[in-house]
């Protein structure tokens, strides 16, 4: 079954915020995060024929985490979208190593309200950036992307135990990093 | 800035950077967050505000992204469909090509209706017997030859070789016809109709029409006919002399009584020698118009033109003398061409070499246009060649970055230093001309890279853009670009633009752009210009040693009966370049003149009074005062040796180079001379001249050309005007 416009709108409503949070935490840059989320949904719409077969597969075995208990969205949809998002981010990183493409008007430094001026966002981002990449990614997929450990394991192509261990270590390291900031 | 002030700056910078007041409550917040349990820590991780407008953008996607029906098909089906279409269209194209080849026989491939019916170009493929080709072109042979010659002349100047007429392919014929339309030779031809008749692609049609209009609106090329000769319009050739030039392809002898001298703007091209060498290596004889005597002489000038020498100090206590800006070499001897009563004079003007000098550490970002238009006229090759030489200027602390752009931009290499010369050359060699051109993208990318480069107060950051200059943007784009350039300039990044465009008019916005970017806009056509301008862009050290230089040669009528200029024959491209491009003498470059003269006294004998036979005057502009400055040198009769053996090695070499060019041009004044004779003469040149690589290369070139059996019936000269 193909994705209809109504279903696409629902996808946006259900998943865009989580996807944006993951993108922002991974990339550390608001505009890039916004762009990559937009690219993700464009890809989703372009390949909407595949939506039915890919998104509605039941989660693989082992997906019995506590997070299943209160689902307020379709988990298979989230996993599908997060997988696309991860590919887009990887593409962007790879491209950024070699290429600078200006497709829009130059950034003239227009002042705009900073949406991240509250809470611990900046300190958290700094601490996150100091985590090893594999720990950071596992933590963000599970905690911010709200994937199950099994979905994250499938996406990262590692055993579920590895994901569990990484998320746990990531939390500990994150806490250490934050304590380190306090002591400075 | 000296060392001490740099240290002070660093200390100040560190203090300023560290002088950030921690927000109230930050420490308390951090302590709280560090003590959070897992659930609360996760909640903080998810605490990312969603930007306003994101949802709107995402919801709008279905309306903007159109997925075509075929894209919805499964991948294997799409692949199979694509393969089928490829087979169908490939077969159809092959069939059409066969039909089209067959139709060439007996049909015209250029326009032939009404007003344009003059130019009928018919060629078969290369394997068609020459008689049949001749028969086909017979009715309009003159027109075809004219078209071919114009194409050849233009291509020569642009460094591209084309096939000779009898081997002409359809594309050669087409390019010949296009060259005709895009010139002023046939003003009655309608470019729009011609383009429509010759070209299927509407974009190509538009480009042709644009080029034709640009050339036609440029300063007049063909009237009055022989402009390059004589001091401007003062000494036009007579109708008979013009006819001679048209038939023979070289200038006729002129009476010194009627016209005592000639004055020329400088031609610094050396591309003709490269073209000829490539052709000869491939076993092809060049067309007459591809041989430019003055360019061969200039290309081989290291063999005969001396470098400027510093005058000796008069007293040992005198300060070291400064090196003069140029060296003017005048050599004379018996002419190997027209007969024993003639003398050959060669004049070489060489700019002083400027060794690299200390400059502030510079990060130069070179932005190169690699769109398909850069393949025309060898623009990209010129850029690649001259950018490779830029590494000679590199010093410790300098950095080079290469950005290429067509419809998008890419950083090819970044931050290369003096030790990375091979990487720089490899990056240049990887450039290919393809795709459409979007200079705004390239400039923006170049500025972005320059701005993001590591900044210390000592490093100068510059961006230089090499493009074909044909940008046509709307005002909004120009304004956006200007804002970007202005922002970069405030950040210390300057912008230079070098259009590699001899003819095409430039949009006035380019000038405004470089003004905003605190840089310069300078055209470059030949290697000396581009090299000089790149060095100026990099080190901000002037490379022009004689601005707006001009050479005048005069012959006193009581000592010289007649004189004949070798080389400098008019061609559409050469004249256009002369009229639109500067004639500055750049550091380390040479321009040349050669004359055959007939002295009133044939033989110089001991005891004869020594008199002046020629005066060469260099004239240039003093930029400080704006005045024209002149410097003259005389050639005395005693310097004109009677035999080859008496003449010096430098003159012998120059004479053999000029003679080679005359033979290859099929000059009627060189009919008694063969390339074998010249090769033999070269073999008699002694060491150390004979051991120099340029000399050995030239000898090999002459020997290879001789093996191709140049015959009079190989004449490929156009009937000219």
Image (spheres, helix red, strand yellow):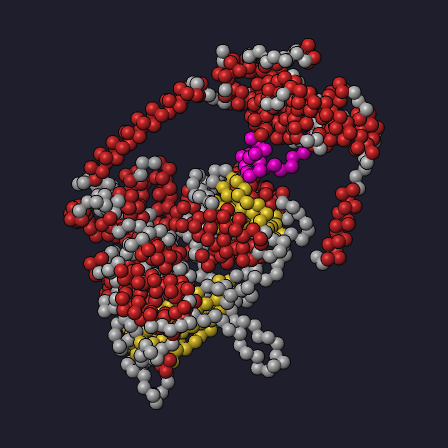
Q: Position of residue B268 (x, y in %)?
A: 42, 61
Viewer-proximal residue, A19 or B595?
A: A19
Q: Is residue B280 visible?
A: yes
Viewer-proximal residue, B14 or B592?
A: B14
Indicate yes or no whether the magenta region holds residue B561: no
Magenta segment, principal secondary structure? loop
Q: Residue at x 31, y 43 (%)?
A: B191
Q: Quick check: B652 above or below B48?
A: below
Q: Residue at x 63, y 21 (%)?
A: A159
Q: Position of residue B719 (x, y in %)?
A: 23, 57
Q: Quadrant of the C terminus of chain A?
A: top right
Quarter of the view holding residue A139: top right
Q: Position of residue B664 (x, y in %)?
A: 28, 62
Q: Residue at x 55, y 35 (%)?
A: A95
Q: Is residue B485 visible?
A: no
Indicate yes or no whether the magenta region holds residue A98: yes
Outermost residue to the bottom: B607
Viewer-proximal residue, B122 or B303?
A: B303
In this picture, residue B484 sits left or right of residue A49 = right
Outermost residue to the top: A69
Q: Residue at x 53, y 43 (%)?
A: B412
In this picture, residue B424 sits left or right of residue B99 = right
Q: How many marks?
A: 0
In this picture, residue A141 sits left or right of residue B503 = right
Quarter of the view holding residue A110: top right
In this picture, residue B48 sits left or right of residue B128 = right
Q: Which stretch is magenta?
A: A91-113
Q: Position of residue B313 (x, y in %)?
A: 57, 79
């Amino acid at each position: 079954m193909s994705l209809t416009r109504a279903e696409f709108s629902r996808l946006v409503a259900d998943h865009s915020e989580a996807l944006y949070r993951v993108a922002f935490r991974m990339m550390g840059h608001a505009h890039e995060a916004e762009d990559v989320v937009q690219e993700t949904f464009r890809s989703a719409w372009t390949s909407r024929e595949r939506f039915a077969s890919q998104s509605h597969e039941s989660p693989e075995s082992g997906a019995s985490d506590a997070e299943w208990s209160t689902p307020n969205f379709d988990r298979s949809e989230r996993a599908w979208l997060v997988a696309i998002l991860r590919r887009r981010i990887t593409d962007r990183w790879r491209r950024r190593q070699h290429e600078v493409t200006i497709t829009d008007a130059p950034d003239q430094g227009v002042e705009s309200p900073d949406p991240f001026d509250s809470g611990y966002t900046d300190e958290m981002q700094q601490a996150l950036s100091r985590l090893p990449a594999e720990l950071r990614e596992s933590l963000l997929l599970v905690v911010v992307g709200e994937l199950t450990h099994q979905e994250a394991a499938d996406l990262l192509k590692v055993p579920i135990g590895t994901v569990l261990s990484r998320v746990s270590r990531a939390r500990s390291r994150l806490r250490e990093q934050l304590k380190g900031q306090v002591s400075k | 800035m000296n060392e001490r002030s740099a240290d002070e700056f660093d200390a100040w910078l560190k203090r300023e950077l560290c002088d950030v007041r921690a927000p109230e409550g930050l420490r308390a917040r951090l302590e709280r967050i560090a003590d959070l349990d897992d659930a609360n820590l996760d909640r903080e991780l998810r605490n990312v505000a969603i930007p306003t407008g994101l949802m709107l953008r995402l919801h709008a996607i279905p309306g903007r992204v159109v997925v075509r029906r075929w894209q919805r098909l499964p991948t294997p089906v799409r692949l199979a469909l694509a393969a089928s279409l490829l087979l169908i269209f490939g077969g159809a194209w092959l069939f059409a090509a066969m039909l089209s080849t067959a139709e060439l026989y007996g049909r015209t491939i250029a326009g032939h209706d009404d007003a344009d019916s003059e130019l009928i170009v018919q060629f078969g493929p290369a394997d068609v017997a020459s008689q049949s080709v001749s028969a086909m072109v017979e009715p309009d042979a003159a027109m075809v030859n004219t078209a071919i010659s114009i194409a050849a002349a233009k291509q020569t100047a642009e460094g591209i070789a084309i096939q000779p007429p009898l081997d002409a392919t359809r594309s050669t014929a087409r390019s010949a016809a296009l060259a005709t339309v895009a010139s002023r030779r046939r003003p009655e031809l309608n470019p729009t109709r011609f383009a429509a008749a010759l070209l299927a692609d509407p974009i190509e049609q538009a480009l042709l029409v644009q080029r034709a209009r640009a050339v036609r609106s440029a300063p007049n090329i063909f009237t009055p006919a022989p402009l390059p000769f004589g001091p401007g319009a003062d000494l036009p050739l007579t109708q008979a002399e013009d006819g001679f030039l048209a038939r023979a392809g070289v200038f006729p002898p002129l009476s010194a009584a009627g016209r005592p001298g000639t004055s020329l703007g400088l031609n610094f091209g050396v591309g003709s020698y490269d073209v000829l060498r490539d052709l000869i290596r491939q076993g092809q004889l060049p067309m007459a118009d591809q041989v430019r005597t003055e360019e061969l002489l200039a290309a081989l000038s290291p063999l005969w033109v001396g470098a400027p020498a510093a005058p000796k100090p008069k007293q040992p206590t005198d300060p070291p003398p400064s090196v003069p800006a140029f060296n003017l070499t005048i050599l004379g001897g018996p002419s190997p061409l027209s007969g024993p009563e003639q003398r050959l004079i060669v004049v070489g003007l060489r700019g002083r070499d400027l060794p690299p000098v200390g400059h502030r550490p510079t990060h130069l970002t070179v932005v190169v246009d690699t769109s398909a238009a850069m393949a025309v006229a060898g623009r990209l090759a010129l850029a690649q060649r001259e950018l490779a030489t830029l590494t000679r200027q590199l010093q410790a602390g300098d950095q080079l970055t290469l950005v290429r752009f067509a419809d998008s931009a890419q950083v090819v290499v970044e931050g290369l230093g003096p030790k990375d010369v091979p990487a720089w050359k490899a990056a240049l060699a990887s450039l290919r001309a393809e795709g459409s051109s979007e200079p705004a993208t390239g400039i923006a990318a170049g500025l972005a890279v320059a701005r993001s480069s590591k900044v210390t107060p000592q490093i100068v950051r510059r961006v230089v853009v090499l493009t074909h200059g044909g940008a046509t943007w709307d005002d909004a784009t120009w304004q956006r670009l200007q804002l970007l350039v202005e922002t970069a300039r405030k950040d210390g990044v300057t912008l230079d633009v070098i259009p590699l465009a001899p003819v095409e008019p430039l949009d006035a916005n380019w000038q405004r752009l470089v003004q905003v970017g605190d840089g310069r806009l300078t055209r470059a056509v030949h290697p000396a210009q581009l090299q000089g301008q790149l060095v100026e862009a990099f080190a901000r050290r002037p490379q022009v040693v004689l601005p707006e230089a001009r050479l005048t040669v005069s012959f006193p009528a009581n000592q010289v009966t007649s004189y004949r200029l070798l080389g400098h024959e008019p061609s559409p491209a050469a004249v256009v370049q002369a009229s639109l491009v500067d004639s500055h003498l750049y550091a380390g470059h040479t321009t040349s003149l050669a004359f055959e003269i007939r002295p009133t006294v044939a033989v110089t004998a001991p005891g004869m009074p020594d008199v002046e036979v020629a005066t060469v005057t260099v004239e240039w502009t003093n930029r400080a005062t704006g005045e024209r400055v002149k410097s003259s040198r005389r050639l005395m009769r005693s310097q004109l040796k009677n035999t080859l053996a008496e003449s010096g090695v430098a003159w012998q070499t120059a004479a053999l180079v000029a003679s080679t060019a005359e033979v290859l041009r099929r000059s009627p004044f060189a009919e008694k001379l063969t390339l074998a004779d010249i090769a033999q003469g070269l073999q008699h040149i002694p060491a150390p001249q004979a051991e120099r690589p340029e000399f050995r290369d030239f000898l090999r070139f002459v020997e290879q050309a001789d093996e191709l059996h140049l015959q009079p019936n190989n004449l490929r000269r156009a009937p000219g005007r």
